[in-house]
Amino acid sequence: MQALLRLSRQGGSLRQIQSSGLSVAFARAYASHELTVRDALNSALDEELARDDSVFVLGEEVGEYQGAYKITRGLLQKYGAERIRDTPITEAGFTGIATGAAMAGLRPVCEFMTFNFAMQAIDQIINSAAKTLYMSAGTIPVPIVFRGPNGAAAGVAAQHSQCYGAWYSHVPGLKVIAPYDAEDARGLLKASIRDPDPVVFLENEILYGQAFPVDDKVLDKDFVLPIGKCKIQKEGTDITLVGFGRCVGHNLKAAAELEKAGISAEVINVRSLKPLDRDTIVNSVKKTHRVLALEEGWPQCGFCAEIIAVVNEECFDDLDAPPERVTGAEVPMPYAANLEAAALPTPADVVKVAKRMLGK
Amino acid sequence: MRTLTHTLHSPAGCRNAHASHLQHPQSFHARRLNRAQRPASLQICCQAVATGTPPVKEGTSISNGAAKSKSKKISPEVATTLYRDMVLGREFEEMCAQMYYRGKMFGFVHLYSGQEAVSTGIIKAMRADDYICSTYRDHVHALSKGVPSRGIMAELFGKKTGICRGQGGSMHMFSKEHRMLGGFAFIGEGIPVGLGAAFRVKYQKDAVGDESADQVCASFFGDGTCNNGQFYECLNMASLYKLPCIFVVENNLWAIGMNHPRATGPSEGDTAPAIYKKGPAFGMPGVLVDGMDVLKVRQVAEEAVERARKGLGPTLIEAETYRFRGHSLADPDELRKKEEKAAWGARDPIPQFRKYALDEGLLTEQQIKDIDKDVQAEVEDAVQYADESPKPEKGQLLENVFADPKGFGIAANGSYRYQSPGFHSGNTAAID
Ligand SMILES: Cc1ncc(C[n+]2csc(CCOP(=O)(O)OP(=O)(O)O)c2C)c(N)n1
Ligand SMILES: [Mg+2]
């Protein structure tokens, strides 16, 4: 540890000058619309269905019910029951059908009412979808998107509230996306549908109704974001806060709080968990010399563990403090509101740990 | 017709249904009765062809709501038990709706109103030491099994005095004492779990040599769940191992917004799906029963329980029923037609049984009044108890994750992590 602390802060001021937060200000100035994450996902599906007739949606309640969380609202009316396919409650069955259809040439978007239920189909996702290209010597690609809400929702307890980010990130052959805002949701869902590989697309129920400013280019029907790139959501100089999905929002809140204490935090939105954009994370840490990773999931073998490993591998000598993580508690999600709150990390937790890392 | 069971707690859905029933009972009813009007022998799907074993019984035909039950006579004591249990189920659930809208309970709360005759009919035909296994729609199964209403309500309020100390919640009711094995939120999950309990009983008898082991297990689940592979896997294993279990399908015609015939295909030669017919295909009797008639359900249950207890194996029961509310309290319930709700509202199992009990002289008006009052008092007491109970303490957070908390591993200082001060309060303690 002494070795880390020995690293001087002299370079800090120089680096601070380089990062003046211009891009964020630019984006804000040109923001002309607000879009909810729900509408962003809905419009992305709509446009990709219109663009390519091999794209279809299947899952429970995606059609007549208009989606359990209304992500597919209006699509049945527009594209018909053949392309917006209601399935029985049979995750293993319909995930298998989707995977087979992809192997045979279609581009399914397989909706899970929540990702929790995908546990009944994890064999299809990992064994059938993720490994087939390899097993078939590259001859049979599986262009499929598995999507639905992931992670903690409110008051739904142990079986309906958990994060699968780390689980799927572990698997060779899968790409794993976790959008935070409306821009991510639109650009990455469209990119995922066009991608030749199986993509696990982890949404967040609590974010669905949240509106975000978007500029005109995000609304373009050919707007796609690159899979495998992080986004610097807010620039800063003293500490790098890394997270995905809803945790990006927590980190932004924490950064605003830290600002009041004179700490400038850089917030990285890891909107692609796999492939992981190591460069953006490492370059940020080289600038701030401190990294704090945040996730709602459980700590062991988690997302934060991966981020910290990357930093240790690539820029250990740039660190001024040991990397730290804030995660969900090691417990199935409790039902009682106060226990549930205690099981999940908050912006206040991030602020506390960040201050400690900076000796404040 | 008295409506006392609804009055206190504003059951908008079902009572309105009563009122409008007379105007449009037609279309839906007609469709359902097609199946009901088939000869009784067709409705009891015997496995004679497959295995040579006779069917469970003959003669549980679906009646329309107005028809008198032709079931075997019951005693006034049994009538009291059945009536009270159904009224308790209804009152409890309607109170839950109120409490949910007042913010006292949260997340997904799935109410059972309308289906009481199934829970009561099956579980009150079982013994206290028999097992049951339920789904996310589990409050009333727990009540029928004898779990105290105070503990269930407190659980729903997320209180320390709840039957699972606030850790489980609405979808996860467990009671070891009452042999209620859950409370499972995933479709199909409870079916093999129930089989496991039946397996244990048979094991106790056959492997351990305990001749007194004759308990049975009933697993409850919906029509939509019958499309999940676990259902078929379990039908096969239950038959193969001759397990003392009862599969109880509560066919309320809908799985959230998915209408049963849109999700399940008919058997060969049929035009409508029939879940009970899957029984013989797997080597057990399949029985179709009017799930709005508690006595018919009870009769079918008694026979299935007896069969299981005698070691003759499993039974599949399909009870035709209806939920009077949306899928959960968060469901806008936009797809079910008013006429359909009205037709089923008219078959409400509670007034139907009340009338039967009065007509047969099993219960008097006064006794019914007393039961209704008693149940209301119980439910109000449960609410008060839940409301006044303390929340779980923070130190409870990491308890019960392991039976042996050494499972949390070893801390930096070489002792077990769970022994560190404040450990069970969770990660925020580590942050401080
Ligand atoms: C594996 C799984 N997939 C999806 C769900 C979401 N879900 C909860 S209840 C339900 C409908 C169940 O319908 P049914 O079996 O008919 O039971 P009912 O709710 O009518 O009692 C669905 C799809 C789930 N809980 N588990
Ligand atoms: Mg149902």
Image: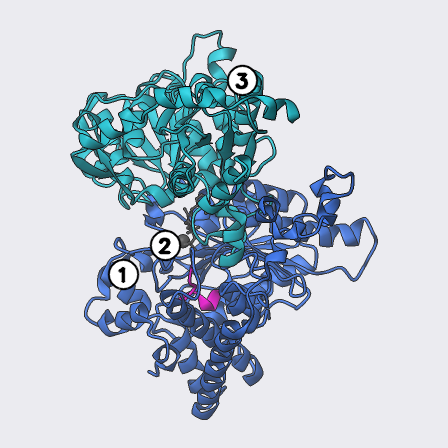
Name the disc covering residue B340, or none: 1
Residue ID for mark 3: A315
| Tag 1 and tag 2 share a subunit | yes
Among all residues in the image, which is located at the extreme front? A10
Element type at mark 3 = helix
Chain in cyan colour? A
Q: Secondary structure at mark 1?
A: helix
Q: Does label 3 point to a residue whose CB lies under 8 Å from ligand 1?
A: no
| Drawing shade for chain B | blue
Q: Chain of mark 1?
A: B
The amino acid on which the numbered mark 1 sits, given as a three-letter code, is Glu
- Looking at the rendered image, the disc whose residue lies closer to the viewer, 3 or 1, is 3
Query: Is label 2's Cβ within 8 Å of ligand 2?
Result: yes
Q: Amino acid at mark 2?
A: Leu
What is the distance, in whole Å, between disc 1 and disc 2 at their CAs? Answer: 10 Å
Is residue A49 shown to the viewer in this render?
no
Instruction: Give yes or no for contact between labels 3 and 2 (Cβ–Cβ under 8 Å).
Output: no
Location of residue A283 in the rendering, given as x and y in whole percent from the top left corner: 44, 18
* Residue pointed to by mark 2: B253
* Mark 1 neighbour density, 10 Å: few (under 14) some (14–19) many (20 or more): some
The span shown in magenta is B109-118
Would residue B97 be found to the left or right of residue B281 on screen? left
Q: CA distance from mark 3 to mark 2?
A: 60 Å
How crowded pointer 3 is (Cα within 10 Å; few <14, some 14-19, many 20+) is rated as some
